[in-house]
């Protein structure tokens, strides 16, 4: 159920990638890079909305705010199918992103309510594995929908999926927040919770590291169509190439769920980050050697090798950021979600807007973000890597 709820976020982004050109043409958008704002608006809304739904879930429990968010997601999906202008589309996408924040922040809070330590990382890995199947399927679903009709049907499909998740949540989800753990919904209480998170060195810098890693994902998503179709001329094979990286991430998340109990979150994620950064550095050198247009087989091989670390980094960094915040899980999850989502959207969009007909802006952005994640991780661990803080972490 948690994976399905979080999948609503990925679905609202990835399913429309094949239709961006059609949506832009229908709404009078001539500049190709401006179409990316359909994705950016949604992600920014989702990031900001988490600052609201986190404290709400700490006060009123997890279930009711989650149902409210799903109802709003359903309504905005229907509205987006009938918007008459690009400006109104962006407005509706922001509201849709805000509504989907409930599924993102509350899902992580529920997992933290029920699990801790390596068990939390294992559960998060399994959730992320299912969650990452969506990028595999979503572009193909979008292509099939576009074969059956126009882009409006994509949003009606989102409405159908969200209505199913609403009914499942309504009938099957128990309340996971213990009454004694509820926090008052007041400015003083919320500010106090935020200060607890910000002052925790490990949580704050792992949130920052997560933001840099997510920026790689966002930079890729906004650039994917232009790179696969514009640079490599894949045409209808675009969903296949996109799915391949999703399969790579899912396998990585599954592998992490099997290894994290044995080796611990820190050893796995920190080793994965070093490998990730090294591979992207090599990839950047190759890209410059080929003047930004290397053979597709080489580009995709390096991409898959680097992306194989992504399932390890995402699940473990999220878990390590949340580990010390069990007593303020809602606010902690909201800050993690806001920073990693809105922050990654802002800096990741720079990659998309820098597209110049080559792959150089993408790979350069990846390398910059990977180095930033390394610096944040070193600060979080006070310069001592590969050291588990306790046997459960």
Image (cartoon, grey):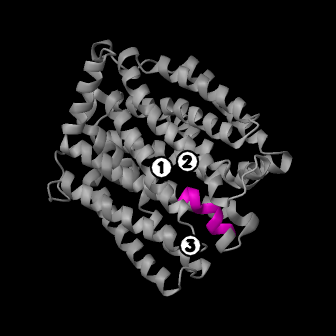
Q: Are marks 2 and 1 in contact (CB under 8 Å)?
A: yes
Is 340 left or right of 289, judged from the image as shown?
Answer: left
Q: Are marks 1 and 3 in contact (CB under 8 Å)?
A: no
Q: Is residue 283 left or right of residue 390?
A: right
Mark 1 crowdedness (10 Å alpha carbons): few <14, some 14-19, many ≥20 = many
Residue tagged by mark 1? Answer: 345
Residue 160 seen by the camera: no
Label 2, label 3: how far apart the Cα atoms are: 25 Å
Image-quadrant location for residue 4: top right
Q: Is residue 63 above or below residue 294?
A: above
Q: Position of residue 173 (x, y in %)?
A: 50, 21
Q: Position of residue 175 (x, y in %)?
A: 43, 18
Main secondary-structure element of the magenta-colored stretch:
helix
Q: Which residue is mark 3?
A: 300
**Disc 3 residue crowd, few under 14, some 14–19, many 20+, Cα 10 Å:** some
- Mark nearest the camera among 1 and 3 is 1
Residue tagged 2: 40
Magenta stretch in the rendered image: 220-229
Q: Is residue 281 visible?
A: yes
């Amino acid at each position: 159920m948690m994976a399905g709820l979080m999948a609503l976020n990925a679905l609202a982004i990835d399913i429309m990638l094949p239709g961006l050109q059609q949506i832009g043409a229908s709404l009078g958008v001539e500049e190709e890079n401006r179409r990316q704002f359909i994705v950016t608006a949604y992600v920014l809304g989702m990031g900001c909305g988490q600052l609201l739904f986190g404290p709400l879930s700490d006060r009123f429990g997890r279930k009711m705010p989650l149902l409210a968010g799903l109802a709003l997601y359903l309504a905005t999906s229907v509205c987006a199918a009938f918007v008459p202008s690009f400006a109104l589309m962006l407005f509706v996408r922001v509201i849709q992103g805000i509504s989907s924040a409930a599924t993102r922040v509350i899902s992580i809070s529920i997992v933290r309510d029920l699990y801790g330590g390596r068990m939390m990382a294992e559960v998060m890995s399994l959730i992320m594995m299912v969650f990452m199947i969506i990028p595999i399927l979503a572009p193909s679903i979008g292509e099939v929908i576009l074969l059956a009709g126009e882009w409006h049907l994509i949003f009606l499909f989102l409405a159908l999926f969200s209505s199913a998740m609403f009914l499942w949540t309504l009938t099957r989800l128990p309340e996971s927040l213990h009454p004694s753990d509820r926090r008052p919904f007041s400015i003083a209480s919320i500010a106090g919770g935020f200060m607890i998170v910000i002052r925790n060195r490990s949580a704050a810098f792992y949130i920052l590291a997560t933001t840099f890693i997510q920026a790689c994902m966002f930079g890729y998503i906004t650039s994917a169509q232009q790179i696969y179709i514009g640079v490599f001329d894949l045409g209808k094979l675009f969903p296949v190439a996109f799915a391949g990286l999703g399969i790579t991430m899912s396998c990585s998340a599954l592998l992490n769920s099997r290894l994290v109990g044995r080796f611990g979150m820190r050893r796995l994620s920190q080793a994965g980050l070093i490998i990730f950064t090294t591979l992207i550095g090599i990839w950047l050198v190759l890209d410059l050697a080929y003047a930004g247009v290397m053979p597709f087989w080489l580009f995709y091989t390096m991409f898959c090798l680097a992306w194989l670390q992504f399932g390890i980094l995402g699940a473990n960094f999220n878990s390590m950021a949340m580990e010390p915040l069990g007593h303020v899980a809602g606010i902690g999850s909201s800050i993690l979600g806001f920073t990693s989502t809105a922050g990654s959207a802002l800096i990741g969009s720079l990659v998309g807007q820098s597209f110049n007909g080559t792959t150089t802006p993408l790979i350069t952005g990846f390398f910059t973000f990977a180095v930033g994640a390394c610096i944040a991780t070193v600060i979080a661990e006070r310069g001592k890597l590969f050291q588990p803080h306790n046997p459960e972490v």
